Image (cartoon, rainbow, N blue to C red):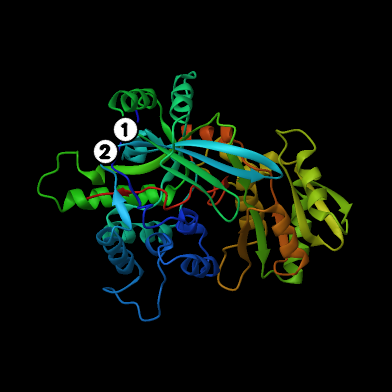
Amino acid sequence: MAEVHPFRGVRYNQRLVKDLASVICPPYDIISPQLQQELYNRSQYNFVRLERNRQLPQDTATENRYTRSAATLEQWLEQGVLAVDQAPAIYLHDHYFSHQGKEYRRRGIIACVRLEEWDKKVVRPHEGTLVEHTDDRLSLLWLCQANTSPILALFEEPGETLSLLLAAKASGEPVISLEDSSGEGHHVWAITEPETIERISSVLAHQPLYVADGHHRYESALTYQREKRACSPSVSGDEPFNLVMMELVAFSDPGLIILPAHRLVSGMSKAGLSELADKLKSLFEIEELPLGSADVWQQVSRLLMSGENKEVRLVVLGLAEGKLLRLKLRDFATADQMMPRFHSELYKKLEVDIVDNVILEKLAGLGSGEGGPTLGYSYDGEDAVNKVLDQEYQLAFLLRPVEAEAVKAIADAGDRMSKKATYFYPKAPAGLVFHRLV
């Protein structure tokens, strides 16, 4: 089903850029203004200048962050800061990181994948998108003509053939090896042997691919492909714009970590908070628990993990003074009536979708007009708790992570979860290797 190809990757010239840890950066969507400045200061060659260039007050339609990224790319290629690999390769990437005191390794394959429209179900989404993010990536594509950061996609591995093959390749000397300031490590090998590439491609050819992180990048690549075809007199199908760079990870990989996207609410009136508390009682069994003073997040974590996995439950902080509320959905039928009709039954039973559609939209009135409550997100439970305790937000709806099986099931059903339903941790970095479309 999926068509996987090698490509001539563009990488930093390590004779000129010796400290690779100082030049890689996160993907665009988690680069805050503060982090952007830190990355600019870290190195004159930090990849943020391509991935997420600065926006300036004097920007115009012809001089802006995208034109500056394009100019920087050309300059770095001319100066030899960046170099194009001589041979097409599939890149093996081992990403080392820690989470909750444990050490992990996530193994991925960076390759080019033929673009397919969503309805073909060769590449399957699981999450909704925001138009402004897709437009942002499309603008960068047109100016730089490059996939600057990989889409993270998942596949089901049939047997251990691929795992054994990759393990053998990882025994050699990597072309990239670094550990960054956060303690994350990266080893990258370039697989160039045609027979090995063919074996990898043939294993993946029979699998659909599931977008884990990068829905906006995939949608922008599809739009770019359509627009390029429309303005090209003849199209063979072999043009680089028919491909997009992905990092492919097996569902079974022990380093596949999904974090929950906790919901944070501000801007509610006292009357609105009181009404919400009353409305929740009609749908949920509510258990009030005293709020511990020293270990709030540990207390929340224990509450989320206890109980049956199939129960819809979450913890709310900020609705009752000095208390945590543990909510367990009791009235499925009424909640179902409050969900969008066009979604699957699986969607309607996911906690994140119940929170967004039932609690936040229907009960709290989020998104009902200007001046109403506003929504924020945190992928760190302790951070979400502290934001409420510090009165930065009024409420925190604390969730369990979505399981990988649910991601696959939603995608197989042709459905999509709420926006920001999952956070695959850690993000695959930008700047290790990238794909030019020229």
Point out the residue furthest to the left here: 233
Residue matched to label 2? 87
Question: At 42% across and 59% down in the image, what residue appears?
Answer: 133
Classify mark 1: helix, strand or loop: loop
Q: CA distance from mark 1 to mark 2?
A: 7 Å
Q: Quadrant of residue 5?
A: top left
Depth order, front residue of 238/319: 238
Q: Is residue 20 above or below residue 93?
A: below
Query: Residue 109 at x, y = what percent?
Result: 42, 35
Residue matched to label 1? 192
Is residue 354 in view from this perspective? yes
The N terminus, quarter of image: top left
Image-based side of 76 in relation to 347, left or right: left
Question: At 33% across and 60% down in the image, what residue appears?
Answer: 140
Q: Earlier in the sequence, mark 1 or mark 2?
A: 2
Point out the residue furthest to the front here: 15
Whether label 1 touches label 2, CB < 8 Å:
yes
Q: Is residue 167 above or below residue 345?
A: above
Is residue 416 in view from this perspective? no
Number of numbered tags placed on the structure image? 2
Depth order, front residue of 217/33: 33
Label 2 sits on what residue type?
A: Ala
Image-based side of 255 in relation to 236, left or right: right
Q: Is residue 219 above or below residue 275?
A: above
Point out the residue furthest to the bottom here: 58
Label 1 sits on what residue type?
A: Thr
Query: Residue 412 at x, y = what percent?
Result: 47, 32
Classify mark 2: helix, strand or loop: loop
Depth order, front residue of 339/132: 132
